[in-house]
């Protein structure tokens, strides 16, 4: 059991707590892709809480960077980021969820759809990384 | 409703940050099953699923959410092609960099330019998918 795993457990518990709060109070599944995509394309009463959630994510990052004095180094080409972003954006809407929506909320609710979706995106991710390593990308 | 959603967003940002999931290298480490494997993401899921699993079980006893009239959760139960195809496409994009929607948006707050490029492209991808969605 190393420090990274312990941080993972604690951080994971907080992610679970965030999901429980949104469902207990707002009655909504905490799927970041769903919240973001609907914020982008739908207008109505729900726009406000969705915006508040996304602002919470961004502001949370802003606060934590200062508080924890975080430094993140990421080597990624702009093209790589654009292609990855397009695929993630398109895929999460087509598949109706992402790691938080399917991977956490869906599995916690014992949804068969979410379990299958999660297995699919994990296998796809694993194969992608494997091929990238093999091809030196 | 707005305050609870905002708080959920803040706590989600904290969870993603403390767990290390905002670092694409940690995510790629998990996906690098045949290489330099980092099991941290498994522990993140364990922590999240324990809390959410218990939470959803308890919430099933609630007649309605605290601040509105009804729980709103996905109705579909059948497995279909969009679900599986979408998940695969998402997984490929995830494996290219190591960002998924949550960490990317938190990354914007962290001031990472790469997170911003990714997020903008992600929004474009979402928009395209929404346009072609069958109602």
Image (cartoon, helix red, strand yellow):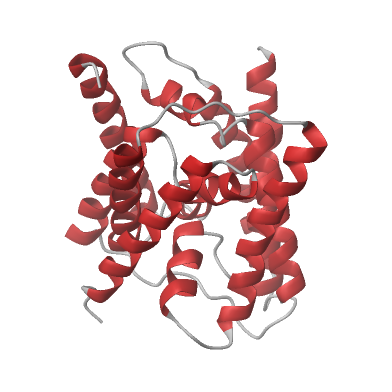
Pinpoint residue B34: horizontal percent, then vertical percent: 31, 13
Quarter the N terminus of chain A occupies: top right
Which of A95/B114 is in front?
B114
Quarter the C terminus of chain A occupies: top left
Which of B118/A16 is in front?
B118
Left or right, A92 with respect to A24, comes to left
Left or right, B130 with respect to B10, comes to left
Q: Write the residue at 51% across / 58% down.
A: A32
Extreme residue toward the right, this view = A67
Q: Where is A76 relative to B13, above or below?
A: above
Pinpoint residue A37: horizontal percent, then vertical percent: 43, 67
Q: Write the residue at 45% across / 46% down.
A: A99
Left or right, B7 with respect to A85, comes to right
Q: Name the quadrant containing residue B69.
A: bottom right
Examine the rendering and report whether any part of residue B58 can be seen.
no
Examine the rendering and report whether any part of residue B108 can be seen.
yes
Q: Where is B87 relative to A125, above or below?
A: below
Q: Write the residue at 61% across / 41% down.
A: B48
Pinpoint residue B95: horizontal percent, then vertical percent: 33, 33
- How many dots with numbers? 0
Q: Write the residue at 26% across / 63% down.
A: B78
Pinpoint residue B47: horizontal percent, then vertical percent: 64, 36
């Amino acid at each position: 059991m190393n420090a990274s795993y312990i941080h993972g457990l604690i951080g994971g518990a907080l992610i679970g707590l965030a999901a429980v709060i949104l469902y207990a109070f707002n009655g909504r599944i905490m799927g970041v892709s769903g919240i973001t995509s609907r914020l982008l394309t739908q207008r109505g009463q729900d726009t406000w809480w969705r915006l508040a959630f996304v602002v919470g994510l961004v502001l949370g990052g802003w606060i934590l960077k200062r508080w924890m004095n975080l430094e993140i180094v990421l080597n990624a080409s702009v093209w790589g980021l654009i292609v990855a972003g397009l695929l993630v954006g398109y895929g999460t809407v087509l598949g109706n969820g992402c790691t938080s929506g399917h991977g956490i909320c869906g599995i916690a609710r014992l949804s068969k759809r979410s379990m299958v979706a999660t297995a699919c995106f994990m296998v796809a991710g694993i194969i992608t990384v494997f091929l990238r390593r093999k091809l030196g990308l | 409703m707005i305050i609870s959603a905002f708080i959920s967003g803040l706590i989600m940002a904290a969870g993603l940050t403390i767990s290390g999931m905002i670092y694409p290298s940690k995510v790629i480490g998990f996906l690098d099953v045949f290489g330099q494997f980092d099991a941290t993401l498994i522990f993140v899921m364990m922590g999240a699923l324990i809390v959410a699993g218990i939470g959803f079980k308890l919430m099933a006893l609630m007649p309605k959410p605290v601040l509105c009239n009804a729980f709103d959760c996905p109705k579909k139960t059948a497995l279909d092609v969009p679900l599986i195809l979408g998940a695969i496409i998402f997984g490929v994009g995830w494996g290219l960099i190591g960002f998924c929607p949550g960490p990317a948006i938190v990354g914007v707050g962290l001031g990472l330019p790469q997170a911003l490029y990714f997020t903008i492209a992600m929004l474009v991808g979402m928009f395209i998918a929404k346009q072609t969605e069958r109602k």
